[in-house]
């Protein structure tokens, strides 16, 4: 952590990172523009664009995003999409494990009440795993992720 702070101080002192608050939202510090930085970074200062595809609300207004940064934005959006899909896959795996309990000797020795609860658990898995049940939540979570990613474009983030 100290090493990172020293590196950032040296970059500021050398002029590689401009000393301004424009396009310097600390939430997106790893994507700040620097003279020796990546092409797919935030702009050094707010600029007008008309070619932003992922965050079209920032077309026609001064923003920190640039077309080349959309590659980075896509990577992060797809990362979170995979995380959310992974959650559903994990629930499917849990359901399969719960279903496999029927093949165990312990299931045959279980009380009637325990078997009823087991069936109820399987029914709940089916409800949760029905796309119509989780699609709205999934879409809302991805909309939130997209909004946060597009917030990096905001020039007046303070």
Image: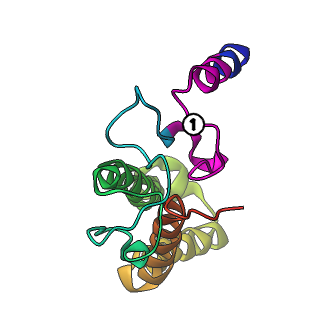
Q: Is residue 144 left or right of residue 4?
A: left
Using the rendered image of the protein, determine whether residue 100 is visible from the camera's viewpoint.
Answer: no
Q: Residue at x 39, y 70 (%)?
A: 55
Q: Which residue is mark 1?
A: 18
The front one of 98 and 53 is 53
Position of residue 56 measured from the top left corner of the image (x, y, whole percent): 36, 75
Query: Which region of the structure is painted magenta?
Result: 7-30
Position of residue 62 measured from the top left corner of the image (x, y, whole percent): 47, 68
Position of residue 107 measured from the top left corner of the image (x, y, whole percent): 52, 56
Q: Is residue 75 magenta?
A: no
Instruction: Tally the numbered discs.
Output: 1
Above or below: residue 23 compared with residue 40:
below
Above or below: residue 126 compared with residue 15:
below
Label 1 sits on a secondary structure element that is: loop
Using the rendered image of the protein, determine whether residue 120 is visible from the camera's viewpoint.
Answer: yes
The front one of 80 and 136 is 80
Q: Quadrant of residue 100?
A: bottom left
Q: Is residue 25 magenta?
A: yes
Q: Is residue 118 left or right of residue 99?
A: right
Q: Is residue 75 left or right of residue 111?
A: left
| Quadrant the C terminus occupies | bottom right
Q: Residue at x 57, y 62 (%)?
A: 155
Q: Residue at x 57, y 69 (%)?
A: 115
The front one of 17 and 149 is 17
Position of residue 146 measured from the top left corner of the image (x, y, whole percent): 45, 67
């Amino acid at each position: 952590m100290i090493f990172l702070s020293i590196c950032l101080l040296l970059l500021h002192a050398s002029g590689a990172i401009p000393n301004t608050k424009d396009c310097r939202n600390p939430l997106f510090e790893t994507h700040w523009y620097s003279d020796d930085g990546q092409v797919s970074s935030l702009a050094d200062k707010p600029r007008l664009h008309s070619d932003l595809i992922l965050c079209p609300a920032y077309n026609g207004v001064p923003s920190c995003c640039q077309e080349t940064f959309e590659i980075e934005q896509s990577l992060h959006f797809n990362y979170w999409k995979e995380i959310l899909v992974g959650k559903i896959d994990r629930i499917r795996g849990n359901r399969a494990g719960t279903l496999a309990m029927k093949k165990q000797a312990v299931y045959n020795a279980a009380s009637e009440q325990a078997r009823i609860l087991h069936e109820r658990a399987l029914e709940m898995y089916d409800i949760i795993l029905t796309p119509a049940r989780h699609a709205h939540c999934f879409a809302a979570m991805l909309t939130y992720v997209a909004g946060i990613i597009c917030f990096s474009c905001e020039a007046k983030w303070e």
